[in-house]
Every structure is written in structure tokens, then in C-alpha cells.
Image: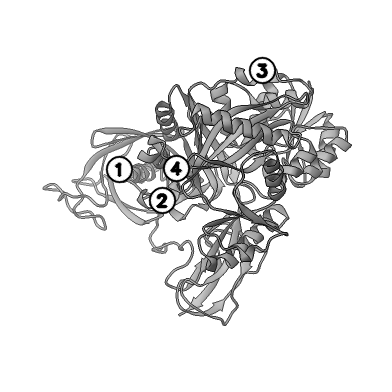
Amino acid sequence: MFSTVLIANRGEIAVRIIRTLRTMGVTSVAVYTEADAGALHVREADQALQVPKYLDMGAIVAAARDTGAQAVHPGYGFLAENAQFARLCAKEGLVFIGPPAEAIEAMGDKIRAKATVAAAGVPVVPGGAEPADDLRAWNAFPALIKPSAGGGGKGMVLVRTAAELPEALESARRTAVNAFGDGTLLIERFIENPRHIEIQVLADTHGAVVHLGERECSLQRRHQKIIEEAPSPFVTPETRAAMGAAAVEAARSVGYTGAGTVEFIVDGTTGDYHFMEMNTRLQVEHPVTELVTDMDLVELQLRVAAGEPLTFTQPEVWLRGHAVEARVYAEDPARSFLPTGGRVLALAEPSGVRVDSSLAAGTVVGSDFDPMLSKVVAWAPTREEALRALDRALGRTTVLGVTTNIPFLRALVTRPEVVAGELDTGLVERVLPGLDLSAATPADVLAVGALIFHGAPAGRDPWDVADGWRMGERAWTTLRLESREGVHEVAVRGLPATGAEIRLPGGAEEPPAGHEAVPGADVRARAVPAKVRVAGERAVLTLGGRVTSYTFARDGETVWIGRDGGAWALTRHRIGDPGDRPGAAGGGDGVVRSPMPGTVLLVKAAVGDQVSKDQPLVVVEAMKMEHTVTAPVDGVVRELPVRAGQSVDMDAVLAVVEA
């Protein structure tokens, strides 16, 4: 076994690999870029070296040599499926913890992979591929365009009509070049109501190949997996055996070694399955397989790479219970799932479940990398219990300072279709309109924010105490709190720590007799007894006799408040502040703003152009995702202060259209 292993990756997968290396008594070496100097994987590793980029193969190999590492684990993404890197490691005397370079090349090219596995008798989806076929001539719709060199759903475009094909090819090719450096595309017949089911395979260097069952990955949005589970509620033991045998043959066909995943598209009506691709690396969703097989896939990768044979055979692989994983992303469901960012001000992660995370208080989430922050994974004896355990765990997860998709995950995992196991890859898009993704600020959260602001010391002078004391009845203090949906006026009097009264907007009752209306507040609101106890990052609110606990963090004039997996930011709105903050993508004033921090990919207009409402103006990319920003009104482009390749912040002005 190796004594030292370098991890050529970052984030939660690097932390996860370090955990296994520590258990095995192997020294871990991390690499990091300047932006990741304070990252969790750097702190967790035994050693860490800075490199210019995670894709700098020469620098990573040099770091391995400098630290005495005998092997390199690529994790997933970055260099994990790079045959050139695998060969470079071998040339430098380092063991690449993954398959041979030839297997990576064979399966990394989707066109070649389909031909290879088809020759081995594995069923494939009918389609065409460049350069042999002219994809513009494809006439069987619906169809799915894929980058030949791609993975992870990037660049995949569903096309339903011939009219959509030219623009879809252009978009897919652009993404393929930017993400993978190769614009070669293929097209396949799109299977309606498909389920995405994949088989985990494991092969040693002595000729043994086994499968570890399947994972259901049908809950996706824009071809990005969201929730995965093992085993699939759709797959019977007979189907599992057949798909597993096909996956084993696919692995054998390219001389595969190590851990890999063979992905199938399955007809949800007939059960027919077709090969999609093979990922020649560890998968993001590998924890669900580990929990139902009681195996450590990273340990098995290491042992195979060290030349050890597998110590079990196919009949000895059995699945116990059920595991479900949810991916926590830095994205905003209320803004069409656009990437977010920021500094983690406070963090609470659940116990009693598995959490693979890259987060810590102080972590800065930027737009340079994939938006996935962590994975919450629950196991239970039955699927129903596992889903409930996952929902509870997500409710105990709080990330303050960065907007995440946790409320969306909770809404999805409790949907009747999901609970019933009636899944397909289009389900998420179909149920989205029925999910409440507005992230509107609840009244109790407004109460916590108002009481925290009201109770903050203003100075040492007794007259600075905000208890509203005066001759006669105590005075009300009106606080204007700004959330994403606007400014809320909340009135408070008394001391929040010992006992106060509060009036919240939107009350349905007239104020009690003898209580004057609060200036600027909802005159219908009634005064409710309230107090808040603050200890560290915890705030306990008593509101009208109900006690609720929250996580909170102050960041200047903004307080972040979290409960039940949700998080809300409230900013103290002073007199004279603008009534409304800038919109996300554009507004009636003709000012077009960036919906996310990222890079300008394309500028599709010029100053002086006459444009129509909703006409594309600028394409912004963040975390390998494109977002087209459109004209908010009919008019003339008067300002266009950005250019292709320019970095922009969220809400940065991209253009001004004069009606």
C-alpha cells in the first residue's frame, strides 16, 4: 500500500478522500490555488501545496514528487478523466488511481464508446455522430445533443423540432469547447419518460470485474443530478442482474480497472435499457452505493491501484436498506437557479446522517468552480424511512451568507411522485411550477430580525437603551427591514431580551383598545408579546407564546436568519436609502443587470441597435452554465459597457436600453 497519496482535486471530494486515507494510515497531500488557500481540504490534509491551477498537470506532478507521494487520486472533474494526465503520472513514476489511459480515451469519447460497447453486445440508443454524420440533417425528433468529450450533463440540449436544431447545435458546441476543449457533438433519439439508472462497476488488475448494483439518478434539472438513491425503486432483481452483466461487459470491452460507472437510459414504460456513457472515475453520488453495500469505494480504488485483487465475488455483493443523497448547491431557486456566492457566516450540518462537505464558517464561495457545496446522505432500512430521514436532515442544515437550494430539495423530496418512486428525468421540470420557490420572508423571521436589530447596544449611555421608555406608555420604534421581496416595516417597543411587544406587517386584526396605530406600520397589526434570547449563533424567539430556535449571523447592517433549512437576509433600511435595490436581470428603467457573478461569454448587440423586448443581448457564464440576458423593453441600446471575456459581479450593469 502507498504511504503518501496526493489528491489532485478540491472541495468536498478532496475532504472525502482525505477521510479514507486517514483511516488507512496513508499520508494525504492536498493541492490548492490562491483562491482556496483557506479551504477546508487544505486544513484537513496532512500536507498542502499551492499550484497555479487545478488543471496544471506539470505543477501537480511536481507537487507529488516534492512531497514523496507514490500515487495521485484525481477525484472527479478536473483531471479525473484526462488520459494525458494519466500517462504523465506513469511517465513520472506515479500511480494514477484510476483506469488505464487507453480506457479513459475509449470511454471519454462518447462516439467511440458507443461503438465499443455495441460491439460487446450492450444495447445503445440510435443516433448520429460527427464527423461521419451531418447533425444539421437529423430529422427524428425529439432528440438529444451531447458533447462527445463531455460529462456531467454540460452541453446537453434537448431539441423537439427541426427549427430549434441550428441554435441548439451552436449552444452545445460552444459549451463543449469551453468546458472540454472539444466541440465534437453527437445526437441521439430522445427516449420519452426516461429514467437515468447507472451501475457501479469495480475491476482489479487480475481480471476480476463485478458490479455493486444500481443508482437511480432520474431527479435532474437541466441534465444535472439533484437527488440520487440506491437501489432504484424501479429495478427488479432480474433487471439488476441483466443491467449489471451489461455494465461488466462494457468495462471488460476496454480493459477497465478501478471504480467506474456505466450509465443507462431506461424506458420507464417498457423497462428497455440503453447504454449512455461510462464515467471512468468515482461519481459524485458514490456515497449511496457505499451505504447500501457497506463498502468504501475510495479504499477499494486504492487497493486496486496498489495491485491487490478484489477479495469478493459477484455473489457476495448484496444490498441492504436504502440510501438517498441530496446535493446542496450555491444557487437561488427563486431566481431560476442562478449560481450564487458569498462568505459562509454560519454553518450548521446535521448529525445522524452522512455529510460530505467542503464548507466551514468563513469559506468564500465564488464563481470559479462547480456550485455544489455538500451532499447530505441518509440511510434507513426502507426507502420511505430514508426519504423522511433525508428531509429531516436537510431541515437541520443551515448555511448563512450564501443562498442555497435546500428549501427546494425539501420540497422535492416530499413530493408525492418522488415518495411513490414514479420518477423520470423530466419530473423536476414538470413539478417546478407547483413548488413555492419564492423564498418570501416569513413573519416570524421578520420578528427575529427586528428584535435582534432593536436589541443591539447603541452606546453606553442609559438613554441609548432602545426600550422606548418615556413618561406614560412606552414608545414604539419602527424598523424598516429590507429583504429580497422589498421593505417591511416592523414596530417594536420594550427590551427584546426581557420582554417586548411587536407589530408585524400583514396583521389581520385591529389594534387593541388603548393602543395607538404605529406610524408607518400596518394599522391592522396587533401588538404581540415577544422576546428573543441570543447565545452565540443561536437565537430563541418567543412570539405570542410559541418558542422557535434559529441560527443567525450579523454581517454589518445585514442579519442572516436560518431555520428548517431555509435562510433569509434582512438589511436595516435607513431613512434615505433607495426604496428598491437593483433587479436581477433587467427592469422597466431599461437597465440590464447581470443575474449572477460570472464572465461575459457573448455580446449579441451593439450600441445604437434597435432591439425588441426579450431579445438576447448578453450571454453570461458562471460555473460552466450559460444565462442569456435579454432586453427588458423595446428600444435602442444606448450603453453596452461589457465585452466578451470580462468578469462581472451580480447586478453589474450589462446594458442600457432606451425605450
**From what the image shows, is residue 600 above or below residue 3?**
below
Q: Which residue is mark 1?
A: 467
Q: Which residue is mark 4?
A: 269
Q: Depth-wise, is mark 1 or mark 3 nearer the camera? A: 3
Residue under pointer 3: 312
Compare marks 1 and 3 and give the one earlier in the sequence. 3
In 3D space, how far apart are the residues under numbered discs 2 and 3 (Cα atoms)?
43 Å
- Disc assigned to residue 430: 2
Q: Is residue 499 visible?
A: yes
Q: Nearer the viewer, mark 3 or mark 4?
A: 4
Callout 1: SS: loop
Residue 242 in picture, x, y percent from top left: 57, 31
| In the rendered image, the vertical position of residue 75 relative to residue 194, given as above or below | above
Residue occupying image coordinates x 31% and y 42%: 444
Amino acid type assigned to the residue bearing label 3 in the image = Phe
In which quadrant of the rendered view does residue 418 lie?
top left
Question: x, y percentage for residue 523?
Answer: 20, 55
